[in-house]
Amino acid sequence: MARYVFVTGGVVSGVGKGVAVASIGRVLAARGISIAAVKLDPYLNVDPGTMNPYQHGECFVTEDGAETDLDLGHYERIIDVNLTRSSNVTSGQIYSSVIARERRGDFLGGTIQVIPHITDEIKDRVRAVAAESGADVVIAEVGGTTGDIENLPFLEAIRQLHREVGQANAVNIHVTLLPFLGATGELKTKPTQQSVRELRSIGIQPDAILCRSDMDVPDAIREKIALFCDVEPRAVVALPTVDTIYQVPLTLEESGLGDLLAERLGLRAAPPRWEDWRDLVARIRAPKKHLRIAIVGKYVELPDSYLSIREAVTHAAVHLDRDVRIDWVSAEALEHCDHLAHHLGDAHGIIVAPGFGNRGFEGKIRAARYAREEGVPFLGLCLGMQVMTVEFARHALQSEDVHSREMNADTAHPVIDLMPDQRQVADLGGTMRLGSYPCQITPGTIASAAYGVALVYERHRHRYEFNNTYRERLASAGMRISGVSPDDRLVEIVELRGHPFMVGSQFHPEYRSRPTRPHPLFRALVTAAIATLREGEQTPLPLGDPVPV
């Protein structure tokens, strides 16, 4: 039987449950225990695929093509596991499923209620993660904050599931905030006490409490929480704010939480292995030369909209012994500025981020043109690859009437066009080309040098693609197709001859980057950016020569 760790949050939202869940998973994985994770989100949207990133942050895509909560990115990166669509459950999915069954007559005319029908569906989804993954431990995070009306069915479901699997096979962990009251100079425990009281009123007793704070938590505070919340003192763990989220697993390890969980759940645990992780954190903190990377997007006011990109850049920079500084550049601001160098001139590398819609598109075009003309290393991701293609095609075809049909349906030169299997699609949610697909790498290219293998698998999220009608014309002008689908139907990677590093990928490489294994394309971008630092300025390579990485 799988064991379960149920994680709830209290006091305020945004307290860092996702990182805490991932770090708990890492602590157990370090002991040789296999982990799966599931996020239980109370909102009525079916998934984040159609949600505004300003409200929800990035939409993370799994190997099997699910559009999920950004916390799954934390889980995958920190635990180092590939999750599936089963790992993100929303109220929208739950209610849709139960109502569909009622419409089919599956309940034989019975009255459908939150208890037991909705809670049973939630429990079935959590059990399905355990069955599908075969993991030793399933960590289930309940989104939202204790006291929210919308997450009550999820809390009731985990209460029931805990009772059904038995006390020896499940633990409850509550993540709370200890606010600091400046007037008295105190960390206050009362909000945590009230949050735990709320949990206990619905039948959930925390076995451990993780206390977030912006400063160290004295032992006296931990002991007070243990007394008032009926938790062992060793199970009250301080989680002060740290300079890197990758420190959090080590903080939990040093607190003894890993041993506590292994003991409570009766797990056969090997001695924990932390060598690579400690080395990672030490490298992050070590003094390093600075490197500036500009990320151009339409949601840059909320960096969580590009969370996986930020982390992928960080992974590559740390691996190459650099301290990366990210300049968040509004694509809309670039549309209206007179001097692009004001926004991009300090950047050693430029990334044009993914997105949908026309807003900021021409600003991204200007960023790509700046990178091409100034020899700045450039990486275009999904829409960023399409931006790179449109910009180069305008230059190569000597026409401003070159566009993507997504932005201009009547363009004379649709170098980016709708995928054939998308033309009759009406619903927006979950209908794109989603998930992992193979990509054949062209030998002798930047992509080939970066990957070092002939076939890779990468995650997609798009409706439009490179229009094959323009392949030969753009190739003759200096664009190289360096990655295609195995049937040669879809262009996956493009790059420019004669440029230090200008690469676009139709897929999202950021989703597959790991702290200890940076993604090859991000590593190649940072390597090229470092080269500009070393040499002061770049000399373009002769036309047609592949660029070494």
Image (cartoon, rainbow, N blue to C red):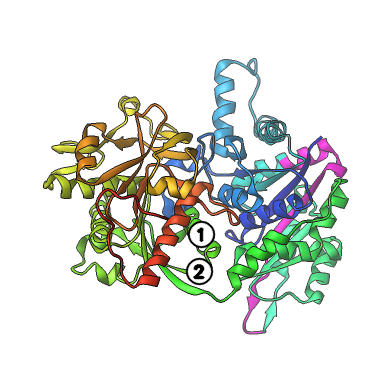
Q: How many numbered dots are placed on residues in this image?
A: 2
Q: Quadrant of the N terminus?
A: top right
Q: Quadrant of the C terminus?
A: bottom left
Please give the name of the residue rendered at 13% of the width and 37% of the height, measured from the top-left corner.
412
Q: Locate residue 239, reporting x and y percent.
A: 70, 67
The residue labelled by disc 1 is: 316
Q: Locate residue 519, reporting x and y percent.
A: 51, 51
Q: Which portion, as a residue range, is magenta?
A: 158-184
Name the side, left or right, on which 48 lies relative to 32.
left
Q: Residues within 10 Å of mark 1 (few under 14, many from 20)?
A: many
Q: CA distance from mark 2 to mark 1?
A: 9 Å
Q: Residues within 10 Å of mark 2 (few under 14, many from 20)?
A: many
Residue 185 vs 131, above or below: the answer is: below
- Please tell me which residue lies in front, 234 or 511: 511
The residue labelled by disc 2 is: 322
Label 2 residue SS: strand
Q: Locate residue 237, reporting x and y percent.
A: 76, 65
Q: Is residue 17 magenta?
A: no
Please give the name of the residue rendered at 76% of the width and 58% of the height, measured from the top-left corner.
197
Name the side, left or right, on which 486 lies relative to 544.
right
Amino acid, disc 2: Arg
- Please tell me which residue lies in front, 255 or 56: 255
Amino acid, disc 1: Ala
Residue 485 vs 149, above or below: the answer is: above
Residue 277 sits in quarter: bottom right
- Using the rendered image of the protein, determine whether residue 43 is visible from the camera's viewpoint: yes
Residue 209 sits in quarter: bottom right
Name the side, left or right, on which 101 lies relative to 130.
left
Q: Mark 1 or mark 2, which is nearer the start of the sequence?
A: 1
Disc number for residue 182: none
Label 1 residue SS: helix
Name the side, left or right, on which 249 lies relative to 544.
right
